[in-house]
Amino acid sequence: MHNELTEKDIQMMREELHQRRTVLRPQLLEAVKEARAFGDLSENFEYKAAKQEKNQNERRIRFLENMIRTAVVISDQSQADTVGLFDKVTIRLADDDVDETYQVVTTMRQDALHGRISKESPVGKALLGRRVGERFHIQVSERYGYDAVVRAIEKSEDDGSAPLNRF
């Protein structure tokens, strides 16, 4: 499987990877060593917590390495009047008569709580390439979908303000 990422995504991942390897890893190894010195490991909460944090860091390192290794670089360019990657889009939900604003981002930077939706989500897929005034259908599942209209497109570019996910 390939991960569709922008150059900026990969750059941010490399920076995080460098930080985790060169700064965080030595600190966590030292914390494990210090906690081990406290004595009986079977009842040593500090040791277990330090080891767990070290292991989480190692998992994140492996995850980032895999994402970078399997990445397919995509462009965040789109036409001036169509929805593209990193654009902020206001849509009107036809059934609810409510406006919602989203920014379409890569999967590594999605955060629905802050209005950033993945280009691979049902809404993201349906939005890409749309124009202002265009009515479209969002198919959420086999049985459920809804209609929306593009109200506004605010062209943006990847300025790095959308952070990487921390899953």
Image (cartoon, helix red, strand yellow):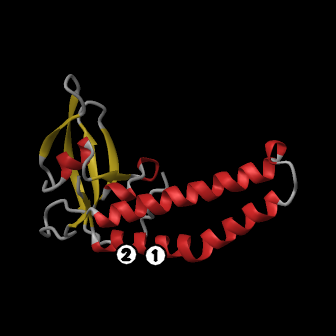
Q: Amino acid at mark 2?
A: Gln
Residue drawn at 86 percent across, 48 percent down: 40
Residue ID for mark 2: 11
Q: Mark 1 = which residue?
A: 15
Position of residue 149 measured from the top left corner of the image (x, y, whole percent): 19, 44
Q: Is residue 5 above or below residue 147?
A: below
Q: Nearer the viewer, residue 123 or 71?
A: 71
Q: Write the residue at 45% across / 64% down.
A: 163
Q: Looking at the picture, tell me which residue is in the foreground, 40 or 165.
A: 40
Q: Residues within 10 Å of mark 2 (few under 14, many from 20)?
A: few
Q: At numbered mark 2, what does the secondary structure look like: helix, strand or loop? A: helix
The image quadrant that residue 130 belongs to is bottom left
Distance from the alpha carbon under mark 2 to that under mark 1: 6 Å
Q: Amino acid at mark 1?
A: Glu
Query: Is the residue marked by circle 1 packed among few (<14), some (14-19), or many (20+) residues within 10 Å?
Result: few
Give me the disc on residue 96. Answer: none
* Nearer the observer, 105 or 1: 1
**Looking at the picture, does residue 47 appear above or below residue 122?**
below
Residue 127 is situated, as x and y percent measured from the top left of the image, at 19, 50
Q: Is residue 62 placed above or below 157 in the rendered structure?
A: above
CB atoms at circles 2 and 1 under 8 Å apart? yes
